[in-house]
Amino acid sequence: MKKNRLSSSLQTGLNTQMTQEALAAQIYLSYAAWATSEGFSGIANFLFRHANEERNHMMKFLEYIMERGAKAEIEAIPKPPKDPTSIQNCFEQIFQQEIGNTAGIYKLVKMSFDEGDWATWHFLQWFVKEQTEEETLALNLLDKIKVAGGEKATSEALYNLDRDLQKEPDEAALAETKSAANP
């Protein structure tokens, strides 16, 4: 009896995305270690929390693949890129990494739609919303860094940013939650 409910292309794609989520966790972890070494404990705390979040995303893919009767393939995780050169560079790289994750999710959404795999399409909708949130959060942080002076931010501005990120929510408010009464 065939138990695998995923096409071979979706099985491969979901496994690839699972590895991409693991890499994202490693990037956040690596950048958190860098931020700690640079004395930015608030930024490091924020990045450590996001490393855990990305690992949870990886686990969602792992569980889904197995629930659908397919084989989860655990692959080697590529080494994270070099340490950032600045706080601005750190969040620019994070934003680019999130754009890459979004592209992978969108590819899977299209593939599941084209194949009529509605269970997988439905599963991926959570990730579509999550990636919108992740990109919005990264853009908001880049805006804050720009206001603080960007690459020329003063020590005081970076200190304040570090302090703010210690308690920054891990989620961004999305447009879908807004209304005329609650802009």
Image (spheres, grey):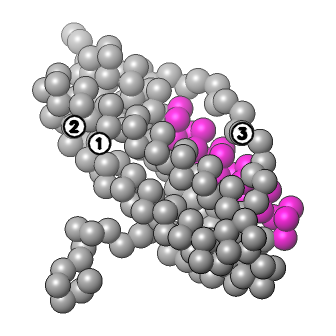
Q: Is residue 106 left or right of residue 91?
A: left
* Count of number-bearing discs: 3
Q: Quadrant of residue 151?
A: bottom right
- To which residue does mark 3 refer? 81
Which one is in front, 182 or 60?
A: 182
Q: CA distance from mark 3 to mark 2?
A: 31 Å
* Magenta-drawn segment: 19-39
Crowding at dot 2, Cα within 10 Å, few <14 / some 14-19 / many 20+, comes out as some
- To which residue does mark 2 refer? 121
Which one is in front, 182 or 18?
A: 182
Q: In this picture, is 23 found above or below 154? A: above
| Residue 8 position within the rendered picture, expressed as x and y whole percent measured from the top left | 32, 14
Q: Is residue 149 magenta?
A: no
Precedes in sequence: disc 1 or disc 3 = 3
Task: Please tell me which residue is depicted at 40% across the width and 19% down the height of the picture.
Answer: 12
Q: In this picture, is 21 found above or below 35? A: above
- To which residue does mark 1 refer? 124
Q: Nearer the viewer, mark 3 or mark 2?
A: 3
| Residue 29 position within the rendered picture, expressed as x and y whole percent measured from the top left | 69, 52
Q: What kind of element bears circle 2?
A: helix
Q: Quadrant of the C terminus?
A: bottom left
Which one is in front, 89 or 103?
A: 89
Label 1 is placed on what type of residue? Answer: Leu
Q: What kind of element bears circle 3?
A: loop
- Asked if residue 183 shows in the view, the reply is yes
Crowding at dot 1, Cα within 10 Å, few <14 / some 14-19 / many 20+, comes out as some
Precedes in sequence: disc 3 or disc 2 = 3
Marks 2 and 1 in Cβ contact (< 8 Å): yes
Label 2 is placed on what type of residue? Answer: Trp
Crowding at dot 3, Cα within 10 Å, few <14 / some 14-19 / many 20+, comes out as few
Q: Is residue 29 magenta?
A: yes
Q: CA distance from mark 2 to mark 1?
A: 5 Å
